[in-house]
Image: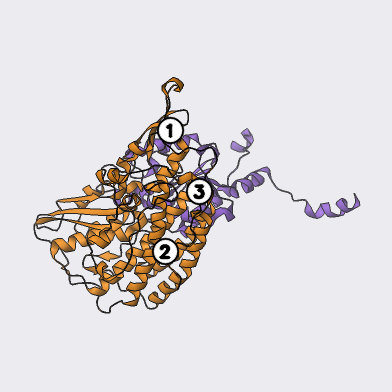
Chain colours: A purple, B orange
Amino acid sequence: MGMLENKLPENVIFTSVDDVINLAKEYSIWYLLFATACCGIELMQTGASRYDVDRFGMIPRSSPRQSDLMIVAGTITHKMASRVKRLYEQMPNPKYVIAMGSCSSSGGPFSKFAYSVLNGIDKYIPVDVYVPGCPPRPEALINGVMLLRTRMRQERTLVVESPLLTA
Amino acid sequence: MSTLTVPHTPTLVQAPNTLPPPYVIEEELASDRMVLNMGPHHPSTHGVLRLIVTCDGEVVEKAVPDLGYLHRAIEKISENVSWKQVMPYTDRVDYLCAMNSNFAYALGIEKLAGIQVPKRAQYLRVIMAELNRITSHLLCLGAMAMDLGAYTPFLLAIAQREVVNDLFEATCGARLTYNYFRIGGLAWDIPAGWEKACHAFLTEFVPRFDDFNELITGNTIFINRCRDVGVISREEAISYGLVGPNLRGSGVKFDVRRDEPYSSYEDFEFDVPIGVGYPGTVGDAYARYMVRVKEVYESVKIIRQALKNLPSGDVLAKVPGSLKPPAGDVYVRSENPRGETGYYLMSDGTNVAVRVKIRTGSFTAMSIFEKVSKGHLIADLVALIGSLDIVIPEVDR
């Protein structure tokens, strides 16, 4: 007991519940392996040998029910859009979306002339971070994830709804 | 210099109590049919392919592909932009081998407009196309192994792919969609020291790829998952119009690079590997896999020859700013990693195409899917999709 008493004061950290939750969220972003087109290859390479997003606690999941983050990688057509929405709805809260590449952000090179391409996935699902590029480099995608993490850090899970505070 | 043969000869170990597909359900034992949707979001369908699978228990009775989830109207866009502006869109037809896609389109418009490409550009185009074939095959082989449960080969393949991406980045600044080819040649010459870097890559790559083969190509589990799966006979392959490694896996020795040489391919010596019936049968998933493995070594051979005899001079022919090819039509074909890619171009003498039709290898591979998948287990479908090397934007365009 004596040893523990000596050690304990140095190891106690005072923090808020929100910060602990945010810490856990930030370092275990499991992303949905959802690739449609060219950006999917860059997404694959971001997860593989050189860029290795495992070091940020990012693990690809095949099922939307296990994922926190949906990286919409590639062109979304009108036929596909309802499926994307359905996948998003299957994800448990809290959930985030990154629109990777110009196609999922705005329709990209296909926005003007293609009759079948959806001009931006944000018409169907809410997007947190847009990553431009055609396709974006893995560094750009990682930067997008970092932006998302700063947003996660500011979130408050426990909201005290006191009439005194809101008045 | 390493001997350019596949180092690990697989030894055939028959898994106990296994019969090769197709499995036939006897009428008395048949149960209610179940309809499963595989995709459009499925990790092993390589994109957004949807298969409507009717199955009896584990045995597939019918697997019908449902296409169009990635129809981007590239052919229609080509009728609205000028001839030169089509080039970036060809990158996105088949992004795994964007250089080859550029290549086919450039060949077509050069034939239509009668443009002579400088010799140096022809050689550099061959080098780029073959490097891109290596990366495309690496991804196909790695992803096929990953779909069958082996994750390490995929990481090894991607590690080598990244090195080639660096080489491409040095030439054109992009990692995936290059837009490096121009009508009449190439956008720029290669930077100083690039040839040396390419040589260094090849010397490094061959032993690394040998390692890859030792890990997975001769692996008994992998062989037993692939052999006798999705057998396409020689006659079927020809009548369904299969192209590229899928055709050669069925034992047909046809390669556009050898039989109808373009862009100085006649200067290089290389073999055209075809499927052998060991282990398994000619035309099964393993034969197609093996053809791709051997083709990677052949590509290394071609790049070495091209680098050795690389001529000097310009890389871009003189092409007018607003290109107006004479009225007429042309069909060209080139050998992509996924087989013969054809471009049918029709011009009416203006700077905008009347019609651009793209014929791709993945689409024909899709057409035989329903026939081949019959009588396989659901788990074998994954091996079959992997071995056909389907890229969905190439199917839907």
Chain for mark 2? B
Chain for mark 3? B
Q: How dense is the environment of label 1, judged by Cα within 10 Å: few (below 14), some, or many (20 and up)?
A: some
Number of the label disc, if any, that sits on residue B65: none
Quarter of the picture holding the N terminus of chain B: bottom left
Per the image, the residue denoted by label 3 is B222
Do marks 2 and 3 both belong to one polypeptide chain? Answer: yes
Residue positioned most to the right: A2
Distance from label 2 to label 1 (Cα)? 43 Å
Distance from label 2 to label 3 (Cα)? 28 Å
* Most foreground residue, B251 or A63: B251
**Disc 3 on helix, strand or loop?**
helix
Q: How dense is the environment of label 3, judged by Cα within 10 Å: few (below 14), some, or many (20 and up)?
A: some
Per the image, the residue denoted by label 2 is B165
Identify the amino acid type marked 1: Tyr
Identify the amino acid type marked 2: Asn
Q: Nearer the viewer, mark 2 or mark 3?
A: 3
Where in the figure is residue B227, as x and y percent of width and height? 45, 45
Where in the figure is residue A88, as x and y percent of width and height? 46, 38
Do marks 3 and 1 both belong to one polypeptide chain? Answer: yes
Residue visible at 11% across and 57% down in the picture: B350
Chain for mark 1? B
Task: Quadrant for residue B311, please give it.
Answer: bottom left
**Direction from residue A155 to residue B46 in the image, left or right:** left
Q: Nearer the viewer, mark 3 or mark 1?
A: 1
Q: How dense is the environment of label 2, judged by Cα within 10 Å: few (below 14), some, or many (20 and up)?
A: some
Do marks 2 and 1 both belong to one polypeptide chain? Answer: yes
Identify the amino acid type marked 3: Phe
Per the image, the residue denoted by label 1 is B23
